[in-house]
């Protein structure tokens, strides 16, 4: 496999459910990112991990909990979500998060909250 | 004021037209500029990457950066229906890896 792979591609969950999104990158990168993409809005950076350490939390509600067990894998644990959390969640990676490096994206998980 | 402004469109052009997509920004510290293309139901794909001012050409695509005007452009020559997508501009300061994105412009190229 190549690039950045996200699973599942689609997820429908109730407000009381707990689920997890998974991201895996095969590019040998050391920085990984979670973004939220909503209609008519720019991509919103949620979390940044650099060499497995969280370096940015962009004021994300605690109902979103990231986990980065190694440089190739990133998870986003979800619990007690709200309808406004319905969006496309994108994972990205870059070489080492330094000096304006381009980021490479997966195809996202389309999340719908009932 | 948003850090990065991008007209969301939609922009509709006939096949073969020259397309001009633009972004303006307010942060003079931005040094790295990128254009991403996003097809429906797919993630953004890096299209062009430039550092500081100047032009960069890759096939039918040309990226221009004018730091004095805080304005970047992407030109698509001989546009094709396969170019129909949303185009996102993104930029970064020199000392971080954080990217700031525009809202994206939706382009439709009609056969």
Image: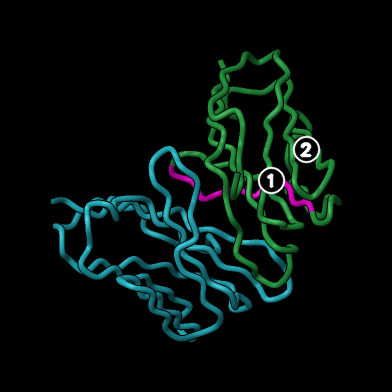
Chain colours: A green, B cyan
Q: What residue lies at 29% left-to-right and 55% top-to-bottom?
A: B83
The subunit letter for the residue under badge 2 reads: A
Q: Secondary structure at mark 1?
A: strand
Q: Secondary structure at mark 2?
A: strand
User: For the residue carrying disc 1, how many other residues have a C-alpha within 10 Å: few (<14), some (14-19), or many (20+)?
Assistant: many
N-terminal label among 2 and 1: 1
Position of A49 compared to B13: left or right? right
The residue carrying mark 1 is A46
**Magenta stretch: residue A29 in it?**
no
Q: Nearer the viewer, residue A19 or B21?
A: A19
- Quarter of the rendering containing residue B30: bottom right
Percent x, y for residue A82? 63, 23
Q: Which residues are magenta?
A: A40-49
Q: What residue lies at 15% left-to-right and 58% top-to-bottom?
A: B15
Percent x, y for residue A70? 83, 46
Q: Nearer the viewer, residue A27 or B25?
A: A27
- Quarter of the rendering containing residue A113: top right
Percent x, y for residue A53? 86, 51
In this picture, is A88 found above or below A59? Answer: above
Percent x, y for residue A111? 56, 27
In this picture, is A22 found above or below B49? Answer: above
The subunit letter for the residue under badge 1 reads: A
Q: Main secondary structure of the magenta part?
A: strand
The residue carrying mark 2 is A66
């Amino acid at each position: 496999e190549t690039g950045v792979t996200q699973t599942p591609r689609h997820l429908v969950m109730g407000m009381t459910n707990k689920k997890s999104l998974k991201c895996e990158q095969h590019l040998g990168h050391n920085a990984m990112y979670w973004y939220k993409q909503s209609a008519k809005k720019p991509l919103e950076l949620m979390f940044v991990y650099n060499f497995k350490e969280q370096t940015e939390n962009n004021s994300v509600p605690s109902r979103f909990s990231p986990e980065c067990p190694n440089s190739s894998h990133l998870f986003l644990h979800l619990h007690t979500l709200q309808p406004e959390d319905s969006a496309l969640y994108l994972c990205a990676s870059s070489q080492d998060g330094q000096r304006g490096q381009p980021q490479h994206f997966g195809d996202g998980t389309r999340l719908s909250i009932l | 004021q948003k850090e990065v402004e991008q007209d969301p469109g939609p922009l509709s052009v006939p096949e073969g037209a020259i397309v001009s997509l633009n972004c303006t920004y307010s942060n003079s510290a931005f040094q790295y500029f990128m254009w991403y293309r996003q097809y429906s139901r797919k993630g953004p794909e890096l299209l062009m990457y430039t550092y500081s001012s100047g032009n960069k050409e890759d096939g039918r695509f040309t990226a221009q950066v004018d730091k004095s005007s805080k304005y970047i452009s992407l030109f698509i020559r001989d546009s094709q229906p396969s170019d129909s997508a949303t185009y996102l501009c993104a930029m970064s300061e020199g000392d971080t890896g954080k990217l700031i994105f525009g809202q994206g412009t939706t382009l439709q190229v009609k056969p």
